Image: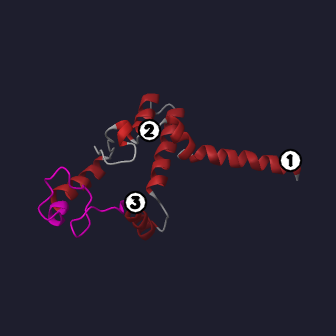
Amino acid sequence: MSSKFKTAATFGFQPVTMSNISLELFQTYVDMLRPMVSQGRCNDPKHALWLNWKGEKDTSIGRKVQRFYIRTLGLDVTTTRIRSLMETVAKDLHESGDITLGAKQALGGTSGHSDATIKAYYLMKDMQKNVHQGRQVFEVFS
């Protein structure tokens, strides 16, 4: 869990949800790579989790994620788009009965965002539906 995020005052900690593969890679980073670059500070709880090669706090994780996807897949994928994808898939899974409402809400809860924020900023499917329906209005006029 992290306490270093913009809504920390409201939520306290922000849990991070990972798949088993992601957790294994993360554990490898924590156990092997981070100690190599931390310059002996990796056991200090106040020291940043994500470090650059100089052992300093890395403040560009989002840009690194984006560059990774551009380099490996040729896609411009940001952390916001990943969150949007997860929220959209969770909504679809709930609507199809594959997950419970509680499971869907738990995903949103781990991000520290309210249902209103998730709906307004992350559920792209609703926006796509609105665009499609808006086009239908223009077709009637043409």
Residue shown at 48%/39% (left/top)? Answer: 90
Which badge, 2 or 1, comes first in the chain's sequence? 2
Q: CA distance from mark 3 to mark 2?
A: 19 Å
Q: CA distance from mark 2 to mark 1?
A: 38 Å
Q: Which residue is mark 1?
A: 140
Give the percent coordinates (x, y) of residue 27.
21, 53
Q: CA distance from mark 1 to mark 3?
A: 43 Å
Residue shown at 45%/34% (left/top)? Answer: 104
Return the mark for residue 62: 3
Out of 34 and 125, give the one closest to the viewer: 34
Task: Work out whether residue 96 can be spotted.
Answer: no
Q: Which residue is mark 2?
A: 108
Q: Secondary structure at mark 2?
A: helix
Q: Which residues are magenta?
A: 33-61
Numbered-mark total: 3
Which badge, 3 or 2, comes first in the chain's sequence? 3
